[in-house]
Amino acid sequence: MRSLSQQLLEACAAIDAANALDPTAVVVRGESIALALVHGRLAADWVRHLNPEADDALVIAARAHHLRRWEVPRTTYPEGKAGYLRWRKDQKARHARDVEVILNDVGYDHATIQRVQVLLRREQLRTDADTQTLEDAACLVFIETQLAEMAPRFDREHLLQVIRKTAAKMSAAGLGAVALLPIGAVEHELLAAALA
């Protein structure tokens, strides 16, 4: 596995400091932690699992894929699919803008910053291996950190549809990693039913 440079460690620490301010805490792997912070950390871990030679841009994009996401809540957009998709697109663009400041502060060059921004916006999904790896990591994090919380709030068929839509965005390698997720019996059963 590729070692982390001092510059990358500084970028990750700055992203983590921003994400640690997320007022929403979740319990993940027995620890109560800010939602955006755990999303960034876990996504970076999954990226390095899926691609042990991941470069700085990919690791940073994973760490920043929910950078200060709570600042623009989903509720500030219209209900329904169109509102949700617009919110997601706007969030990706905002994450790309916000990470530029952090990366400039730790001395990354323009080309690396641009690459991180392309990844955060998920440009060239399905044709760019790094973008797909980032999407796989984000999907794995979603399953681990949010599926259990969603289960009591939605009917079974809706949950199965959410899982299928998530799986449709993932590569074969990403789907293969689902078996490694530390999730409970309810989530395992839902995943098995959705992916059968």
Image (spheres, rainbow, N blue to C red):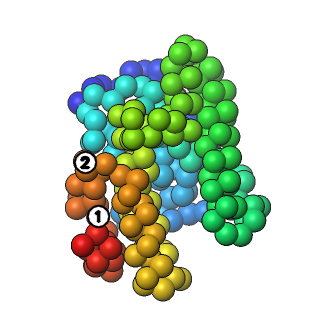
- Answer yes or no: is residue 184 visible: no
| Badge 1: residue crowd in 10 Å (few <14, some 14–19, many ≥20) | some
Residue 80 in the image, given as x and y percentages of width and height: 67, 69
Residue 167 image position (x, y, % from top left): 36, 60
Residue plotted at (31% across, 38% down): 48
Nearer the observer: mark 1 or 2; the answer is 2
Relative to 38, 71 lies left or right: right
Instruction: Look at the numbered disc 2 and give the secondary structure of its residue.
Output: helix
Name the mark on residue 182: 1
Disc number for residue 102: none
**As shown in the figure, which amino acid type bears the numbered disc 1?**
Pro
Residue 94 vertical placement versus 4 (above, below): below
Q: Is residue 136 in sight in this rendering?
A: yes
- Indicate the quadrant where residue 30 lies: bottom left
Q: Which amino acid does label 2 sit on?
A: Ala
Q: Residue 173 carries which label?
A: 2
Which residue lies at the image location 50% right of the left edge and 58% below the top edge? 33
Q: Give the class, few, some or many, for how many residues have Cα within 10 Å of label 2's Cα (few <14, many ≥20).
A: few
Q: Tell me if label 1 and label 2 are in contact, CB under 8 Å.
A: no
Q: Position of residue 22 (x, y in %)?
A: 63, 54
Q: In the picture, which quadrant includes the C terminus?
A: bottom left
Residue 101 vertical placement versus 24 (above, below)? above
